[in-house]
Image (spheres, rainbow, N blue to C red):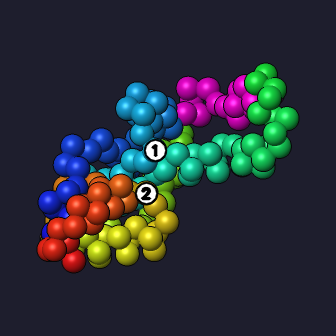
Amino acid sequence: MKVSDVMRTSVIVLPQNATLKDILDNFLKHHLDSLPVIDAAQKVVGFITIDDLVDIFLPRYHEILRDFSALEDKGQLASLFNQAFTGLDTHHEKLILAADVMCSDIHWVSSDDSLLEAAAHLQAQNYERLPVVDKDKKLVGLISDFEVILALLRGTPAAV
């Protein structure tokens, strides 16, 4: 079985010049955890995950969450989130682009790759999903670890 047999073809993407507001709006509106970034030729040039945004705007987020008392004090967490974006007005939101926050050192998989190859790429990147590209490196879909695991669990002999 190939990546093209199980990948998602309906993908929300961002252009390289998408603003911070565009990025956040897409994450929130579509309840996403990652977004591929494409250039004008529809080629994948980067990937933005929710973890990337947390690392940039809330660098102490994981440290604070380890402190159970912070979880009990909802006002403290709300304050933390509000402080992260204090001072970012519309002017600043236009200065931060997708190209500034994306990870450009990503692997992608080909739609012709086997599911085991896709699983290896997902593991190597430590992402839950990766862009799927055609022979011209243009985005054609996304594949997730969930889709790979489901297909492999179904026991399809051609999955390898």
Q: Quadrant of residue 109?
A: bottom left
Along the line of sight, the residue nearer the viewer: 155 or 113: 155
Q: Position of residue 22 (x, y in %)?
A: 43, 34
Relative side of 22 to 79, left or right: left
Instruction: Please give the name of the residue rendered at 37% of the width and 32% of the height, measured from the top-left corner.
Output: 30
Residue sitting at 70 percent across and 31 percent down? 81
Residue hosting label 1: 33
Is 106 or 122 nearer to us in this picture? 122
Q: For label 1, count other residues whose C-alpha is less than 10 Å away and answer few (under 14), some (14-19) or many (20+).
A: some
For residue 13, side relative to residue 10 (left or right): right
Residue 132: x %, y % from top left: 25, 61
Look at the image and tell me whether residue 96 can be seen.
Answer: yes
> In the image, 92: left or right of 98?
right
Q: Is 135 above or below relative to 57?
A: below
Query: In the rendered structure, are the residues bearing label 1 and label 2 in contact, judged by CB atoms less than 8 Å apart?
Result: yes
Q: Quadrant of residue 67?
A: top right
Magenta range is 76-94
Q: Which residue is mark 2?
A: 128
32 up-or-down from 154: above or below: above
Residue type, mark 2 in image: Glu
Whether residue 84 is in magenta: the answer is: yes
Going from N to C along the chain, the mark reached first, 1 or 2, is: 1
